[in-house]
Image (cartoon, rainbow, N blue to C red):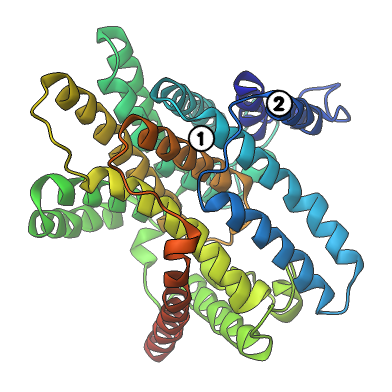
Amino acid sequence: MYPLILLYLILTIVRPQDYLPGLENVPLLPVVLVLSFLAWLASSAKTFAAPQFVLLPAFLVVLMISQLTNGWAGGMKDELIKFGPTVIAFYIFAAGCTTQRRVTIGMAVFVLCSMILALHGVEQAKTGMGWTGIPLSEEGRIQYVGIFNDPNDLGLLFAATLPMAVFLSRRSGLLGRWFWLAGALLLLYGTYLTNSRGALLAVLVVAGCYVWYRRGLFTASVLGVIGLACMKILSSRMQELDAEEESAAGRVDAWYSGIHMFMSHPTFGVGAGNFTEYNELTAHNSFVLVLAETGFIGFLLWLAFVGYSFWMVLAVVRHKPDLTDPALATSWRAERAMALTLLLSLCGLFCAAFFLSRSYMIVLYLFAAMVTGYYIGARQRHPGLPDLRLSDSGWRWVPAAAGGVAALFVLVAVLLRTT
């Protein structure tokens, strides 16, 4: 089961089926996913011990209902076909990531795949064309094939896998350490080549969160200001980071339109994938996109899904077990280091996603699956960690979702006044 879902992960990111001759008509991804699913069904490692296993299929149902309530019954089948594989992949990958060794392997696969895409970008930047046959974008930014054709998506992936590369370097011998550190530098350079403002901010957030954890908020704030100044010097697009800049203003207008879509369709939204039917540009914000297309119900479920992922790794980072036993102390340091890495990856992922419409992107859910599986295993290794149940804590997401909607209203109103 686990090797098959790792192969699915590789095919999802590296995507040789999208550019190698003879593979364009071969359904590699569906076949590998079906085989993984069959292996999962036969496996005794199946687990449903996390709220996300309920929230994600419920979100799929809302995606389907959002099409029905907007007058397209056939859209229910369309959403099932599009998002159903993501739900299946989440279940399988989460079930396979319950041990530290498998989480480490999963991280290594994520990083190696990202390094391949970064190397492709380096070749693009040098020659104007990558080995996939994809050239630099018109703006001179690197891009890949398939779901990573947008430079911003590449930057999102690089920002999310960067903490994993650093973590792997600390878990390896001398040669391995240099390899993974070189990989981290390659991902940083790849992020620079994407010239994605969201990705650059995500890298800054990852670094800031780590410094905050180690040195406190004041040090993180000071270094964050310095880092932002350096990024504005290095990146031409970061120099345009202003609400009055044309691209930024267009995003704010799209957020404003998304808020109005929610107000006109508050329960189930305007329908999954229908944002551009009401606005010329997409939302450029994963939170606004979910709110506009699936309404409050979908936003509540999606926010809870994301929130539980953060809650899980934060629970490990903050947990303080009795460490009088030296062996337990050593084991717990490794556990907390892994949880911190996953937390930093989530911070990078969702910081970038805040400026992109990637609410349904499968990579996001594969990251969340790794976190979910990790926490299930961590609770087995350390029973003192809290048991997160929807029956106990699910009600909290209702006021959290309402607060999130209010925060988006306030943010958009403030930004509109500055444009």
Between tags 1 and 2, which lies in front?
2
Could you tell me residue 94's position as x and y percent? Answer: 55, 36
Instruction: Characterize the local packing of mark 2: few (<14), some (14-19) or many (20 or more) Cα atoms within 10 angstroms.
Output: some
Of residue 40 and residue 414, the one placed in the foreground of this image is 40
Side of 360 where 245 appears, left or right: left
Quadrant, the N terminus: top right
Of residue 347 and residue 147, the one placed in the foreground of this image is 347
Q: CA distance from mark 1 to mark 2?
A: 20 Å
Which residue is disc 1 drawn over?
Answer: 125
In this view, 213 is above or below 74: above
Could you tell me residue 249's position as x and y percent? Answer: 49, 78
Residue occupying image coordinates x 13% and y 35% = 322
Could you tell me residue 52's position as x and y percent? Answer: 54, 52
In this view, 395 is above or below 314: below
SS at badge 1: helix
Residue occupying image coordinates x 82% and y 50% = 81
Residue occupying image coordinates x 48% and y 80% = 405
Residue occupying image coordinates x 71% and y 67% = 62
Could you tell me residue 118's position as x and y percent? Answer: 49, 31
Labels 1 and 2 touching (C-beta < 8 A)? no
Quadrant, the C terminus: bottom left
SS at badge 2: helix
Which residue is disc 2 drawn over?
Answer: 16
The three-letter amino acid code for the residue at tag 1 is: Ala
The three-letter amino acid code for the residue at tag 2 is: Pro
Of residue 238 and residue 160, the one placed in the foreground of this image is 160
Q: Is residue 285 visible?
A: no
